[in-house]
Image (tube, rainbow, N blue to C red):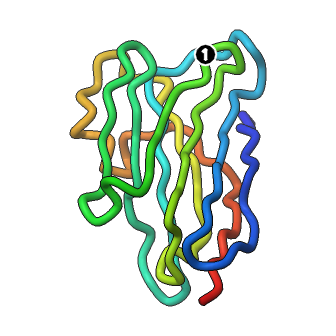
Amino acid sequence: QVQFVESGGGLVQAGESLRLSCAAPEPRFSFYAMGWFRQAPGKEREFVSAITWRNGRTNYADPLKGRFTISRDVPKNAVNLQMNSLKPEDTAIYYCAVDSSRWNIPVSALVREDNYDYWGQGMQVTVSS
């Protein structure tokens, strides 16, 4: 079982920021893309953002554009999700997901959960009003 290491979740007040990180289990573990999804209480899991590892192309859920930024941390073999101006409606469990088998996947396809091979255990992000 491949375990990616998620970090950065927690409790913040509205308007504050958090940075989530998802790191590969070992420095030489290769993957082609990483995405973030979230699931709020009583709702289905939804796409947040994704990035291709080879060329750094990004994709965002439309309502989150401008507040969330995804980026690669090449030395750490990890992907970060910077979340700014957080709102109570951003409260959810956030999951990182990894594609390690689709080497040329278009970034537009990363909105689909079935294009990922591994999933993190999830982190709680709570934004209080």
Q: Residue at x 51, y 37 (%)?
A: 117
Q: Secondary structure at mark 1?
A: loop
> Label 1: how many residues lie within 10 Å, few (<14), some (14-19) or many (20+)?
few
| Image coordinates for residue 123, horizontal then vertical, percent | 70, 62
| Image coordinates for residue 102, horizontal then vertical, percent | 37, 23
Q: Which residue reaches farthest top?
A: 28
Q: Residue at x 71, y 38 (%)?
A: 4
Quarter of the image where the N terminus is located:
top right
Q: Residue at x 40, y 41 (%)?
A: 50
Q: Which residue is mark 1?
A: 74
Quarter of the image where the C terminus is located:
bottom right
- Location of residue 26 (image quadrant): top right
| Vertical arrangement, residue 92 with respect to residue 83, above or below | below
Please name whichever residue, 80 or 122, is drawn nearer the observer in this view of the structure: 80
Locate residue 2 relative to residue 115 in the image: left or right: right
| Vertical arrangement, residue 118 with respect to residue 9, above or below | above
| Image coordinates for residue 95, horizontal then vertical, percent | 58, 56
| Vertical arrangement, residue 97 with respect to residue 107, above or below | below
Please name whichever residue, 88 or 50, is drawn nearer the observer in this view of the structure: 88
Q: Residue at x 66, y 39 (%)?
A: 22
Please name whichever residue, 106 or 59, is drawn nearer the observer in this view of the structure: 59
| Image coordinates for residue 28, horizontal then vertical, percent | 70, 10
Locate residue 60 relative to residue 94 in the image: left or right: left
| Vertical arrangement, residue 44 with respect to residue 68, above or below | below
Say which amino acid is labelled 1: Val
